[in-house]
């Protein structure tokens, strides 16, 4: 269950889903036949204006900055998405 903003410097409590952004990652098991598991993360409104969440294999998640002032993804993130 998601309780707080995924930004550790913020950690604002999640009270309503009308603000911010939810990120869902499909976590697959290491063996065939392992049950499918989804992990949910939330960024509050102010944090979601500046960051997105990206999953790194083996090390969890990380915050990735958006391009300043535009709301568009940083060029490094755009390259990863394509």
Image (cartoon, rainbow, N blue to C red):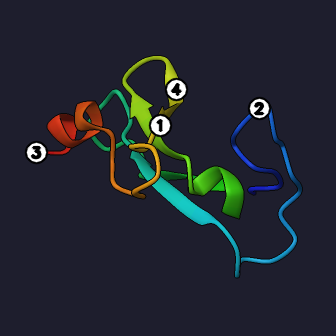
At x 42% / y 58%, what residue is drawn? Answer: 71
- The answer to which quarter of the image holds residue 19 is bottom right
At x 46% / y 52%, what residue is drawn? Answer: 69
Task: From the viewer's side, name the closer residue of 42 and 29.
Answer: 42
Which structural element holds mark 1?
A: strand
At x 75% / y 57%, what residue is drawn? Answer: 1
Q: Is residue 41 visible?
A: no
Which of label 2 and label 4 is nearer to you?
A: 2
Tell me, yes or no, whether the two marked residues, 3 and 4, touch with CB atoms within 8 Å.
no
Classify 10 Å Cα crowding around label 3: few (below 14), some (14-19), many (20 and above): few
C-alpha separation, residue under disc 1 versus residue under disc 2? 14 Å
Classify 10 Å Cα crowding around label 2: few (below 14), some (14-19), many (20 and above): few
Horizontal side of 53 relative to 42 (left or right) equals left
C-alpha separation, residue under disc 2 versus residue under disc 4? 14 Å
Where is mark 2, residue-wise? 8
Q: Quadrant of the C terminus?
A: top left
Q: Earlier in the sequence, mark 3 or mark 1?
A: 1
Which of label 1 and label 4 is nearer to you?
A: 1
Please say if 40 is above or below 67. below
Across and down, in percent, residue 77 comes to 28, 37
Q: Earlier in the sequence, mark 1 or mark 4?
A: 4
Where is mark 3, residue-wise? 82
In the rendered image, the residue lying farthest to the left is 82
Across and down, in percent, residue 20 comes to 65, 66
Tell me, yes or no, whether the two marked residues, 2 and 4, touch with CB atoms within 8 Å.
no
Where is mark 4, residue-wise? 60
Tell me, yes or no, whether the two marked residues, 1 and 2, touch with CB atoms within 8 Å.
no
At x 45% / y 44%, what residue is drawn? Answer: 68
């Amino acid at each position: 269950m998601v309780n707080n903003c995924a930004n550790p410097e913020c950690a604002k409590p999640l009270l309503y889903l009308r603000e911010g952004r939810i990120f869902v990652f499909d976590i697959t098991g290491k063996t065939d036949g392992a049950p499918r598991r989804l992990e949910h993360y939330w960024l509050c409104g102010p944090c979601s204006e500046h960051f997105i969440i990206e999953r790194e294999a083996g090390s969890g998640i990380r915050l990735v900055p958006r391009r300043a002032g535009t709301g568009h993804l940083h060029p490094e993130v755009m390259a990863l998405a394509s």
